[in-house]
Image (cartoon, grey):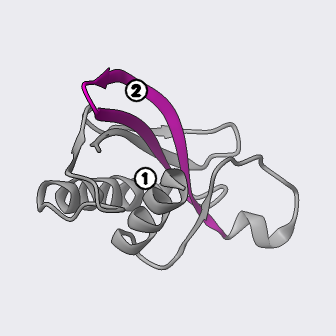
Amino acid sequence: MLLIDVRNWVVAALPADYLAMFSWVESSRPDDAASRYCIVQQTGGAGPVVETRYPRFRVVLLGKRNERSDAQKVMTDIEALLQVAMDDAVPCGAASIRAITEPVGPGFTTENRAWAQVDFEIII
């Protein structure tokens, strides 16, 4: 499944301290506060041309709860992910992957988690 392949590609490009998920909801568990999250979502894409598909994915990185100082880390990590995409390391046998947005962020959730996001398009 393409979504899982993209998630695995993102996880391989990021530091090991992110928990990869397809969605995220804040919880009150103590271990949740100390965790960083990487959310990968499929967002549709342009219509196919001949037999070429262009699925799009959004990657959101979330820092630790009540750690506004994580803003620098999530921005550094999202930039590193962009660099991996530009270095032609493509997931799941795709022809190419490219960022279709500049990184957005850092922003902060109501729980004071720093976040950053970027959208990618894959050519299959």
Dot in front, 2 or 1:
2
Q: Which mark is residue 71?
A: 1
Q: Where is residue 44 drawn, in percent x and y?
A: 48, 28
Question: Identity of the amino acid at label 1?
Answer: Ala
- Taking the spot 52% from the left edge, 51% from the top edge, the residue there is 3
State which quadrant residue 38 falls in: bottom right
Q: Earlier in the sequence, mark 2 or mark 1?
A: 2
Range of residues picked out in magenta: 35-63
Disc 2 target residue: 45
Report x, y in % for residue 117: 42, 41
Q: Looking at the picture, how far across and down is residue 108, in whole percent?
A: 55, 39
Q: Is residue 35 left or right of residue 9?
A: right
Q: Is residue 114 left or right of residue 109?
A: left
Q: State the residue at coordinates (66%, 57%).
A: 65
Identify the residue at image location x=84%, y=54%: 27
User: Mark 1, residues whose alpha carbon is within 10 Å: few (<14), some, or many (≥20)?
Assistant: many
Judge by depth and name the residue closer to the eye, 86 or 16: 86
What is the chief secondary structure element of the magenta stretch?
A: strand
Q: Looking at this view, name the residue that lies furthest to the right.
A: 28
Q: Amino acid at mark 2?
A: Gly
Work out whether 100 lies above or below 2: above
Q: Nearer the viewer, residue 66 or 117?
A: 117
- Seen in the picture, residue 94 relative to 9 is either above or below; the reply is above
